[in-house]
Image (tube, rainbow, N blue to C red):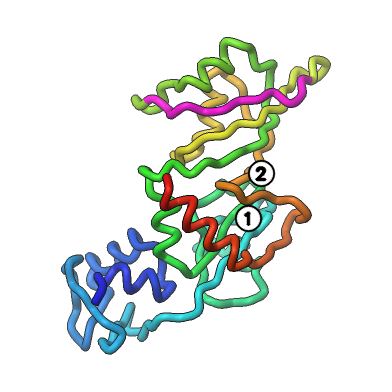
């Protein structure tokens, strides 16, 4: 037997945290009874419904997408805008792992493996994410040191980061910076540079854990290999 929210996540409904929300909101039934207790356990023999639709375990799918800008990082959009799901030809029930801003491009994982998604996005896991940013102004040595050691955002200090200036364009007063963080706060990279009044003009995620965009063009996606999936599980379990 396993907890209901874990079972739902393994069925590809959503991440475990989202599945907990579904349970608490009364949208899940087990054998015809609405369940709101997160401690409820089920087996594959039980009939489980979400919004009156039966769910059951399915083949696990894992995709790596090179997300373009101006694409919503969501399963669907109330305003009818294009989402990352629309870029995947196979229309299985998958969802993005974490998110990238509307105007941010780069590496994004999509899966129906709610358990792995929950592990990767859990705040305690500190999965490393590397971004390439084009910013206004020249990033100074003291600013780099402060960013690496942590700055105060919304009353809380950021964790240590790795910052490398890849190019400086003095004529146009721009800097091109590679930054690696291990947190997932909203708009974190933008806010970190904005702290020193450096507006982010372009932002791309180029690496997530050990995965990168090598050999891919913007808008393309590929399936992860079994070896990569196992390595991803090992990576997050060892954090």
Placement of 1 over or under 77, stated as above or below:
below
Quadrant of the rendered image containing residue 23? bottom left
Q: Tag 1, which secondary structure? A: loop
- The label number, if any, that marks residue 176 in the structure image: none
Q: Nearer the viewer, residue 152 or 101?
A: 152
Residue at figure coordinates x 68%, y 55% from the top left: 66
Relative side of 211 to 150, left or right: right
Relative side of 88 to 194, left or right: right
Magenta range is 157-168
In whole angstroms, how far apart are the C-alphas of marks 2 and 1? 17 Å
Give residue 34's position: percent from left, percent from top.
19, 78
**Is 200 within the magenta?**
no
What quarter of the picture does the N terminus occupy? bottom left
- The label number, if any, that marks residue 71 in the structure image: 1
Quadrant of the rendered image containing residue 193? top right
What is the magenta segment's predominant secondary structure?
strand
């Amino acid at each position: 037997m396993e907890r209901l929210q874990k079972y739902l996540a393994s069925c590809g409904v959503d991440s475990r945290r989202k599945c907990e929300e579904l349970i608490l909101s009364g949208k899940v039934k087990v054998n015809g009874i609405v369940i709101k207790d997160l401690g409820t356990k089920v087996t594959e023999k039980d009939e489980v419904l979400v919004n009156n639709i039966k769910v059951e375990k399915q083949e696990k799918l894992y995709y790596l997408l090179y997300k373009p800008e101006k694409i919503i990082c969501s399963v669907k959009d109330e305003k009818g805008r294009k989402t990352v799901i629309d870029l995947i030809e196979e229309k299985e029930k998958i969802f993005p792992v974490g998110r990238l801003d509307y105007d941010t491009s780069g590496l994004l994982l999509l899966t129906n493996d709610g358990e792995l998604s929950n592990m990767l996005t859990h705040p305690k896991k500190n999965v490393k994410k590397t971004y390439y940013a084009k910013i206004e102004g020249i990033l100074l040595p003291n600013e780099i040191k402060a960013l690496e050691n942590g700055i105060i955002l919304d009353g809380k200090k950021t964790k240590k980061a790795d910052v490398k200036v890849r190019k400086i364009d003095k004529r146009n007063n721009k800097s091109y910076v590679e930054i690696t963080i291990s947190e997932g706060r909203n708009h974190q990279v933008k806010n970190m540079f904005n702290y020193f009044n450096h507006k982010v003009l372009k932002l791309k995620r180029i690496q997530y854990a050990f995965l990168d965009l090598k050999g891919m063009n913007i808008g393309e996606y590929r399936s992860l290999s079994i070896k990569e999936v196992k390595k991803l599980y090992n990576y997050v379990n060892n954090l």
